[in-house]
Amino acid sequence: MLYTHMVVPIDQVRPHPSNARTHSKKQVGQIAASIRELGFAAPILIDENKVLIAGHGRLEAAKSLGMSSIPLDRHLRAERGQEAGAAAS
């Protein structure tokens, strides 16, 4: 898998419509406290269309803190055969 690290405006990230995991207000508050104290230990993960793959709680916590941008890793799909060729090298 290919990833690129970047920081984007928080309003450009869209939650995944099929996200089954929910976070209580208490959990979001705890995540926000951790971000405030330590920063982002693990960036969120989005796809090529800026749809959230992992990190829904971190996104909500960042919004609750009034953050305007968020660090993330963007998953880039390899062209068919590209990953196999890279593994053979």
Image (cartoon, rainbow, N blue to C red):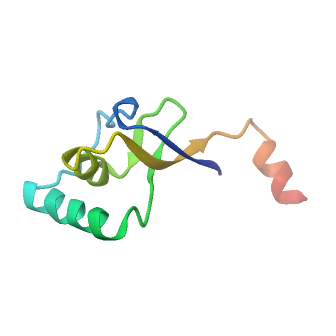
Q: Which residue appears at 27% of the width and 63% of the height?
A: 36
Q: Locate residue 80: give its quadrant.
A: top right
Judged left or right of residue 64, residue 83 is right
Residue 18, x across and y down, in percent:
29, 37
Residue 79, x across and y down, in percent:
74, 35
Residue 37, x across and y down, in percent:
29, 70
Judged left or right of residue 41, residue 37 is left
Vertical relation: 34 (above or below) 12: below
Judged left or right of residue 43, residue 24 is left
Q: Quadrant of the C terminus?
A: bottom right
Q: Locate residue 75: give its quadrant.
A: top right
Residue 44, x across and y down, in percent:
42, 52
Q: Which residue appears at 35% of the width and 70% of the height?
A: 38
9 or 75, which is in the foreground?
Answer: 9
Furthest residue toward right: 89
60 or 85, which is in the foreground?
Answer: 60
Vertical relation: 25 (above or below) 49: below
Q: Which residue appears at 35% of the width and 32% of the height?
A: 14
The tally of labels here is 0
Q: Locate residue 39: give its quadrant.
A: bottom left
Q: Which residue appears at 30% of the width and 63% of the height?
A: 35
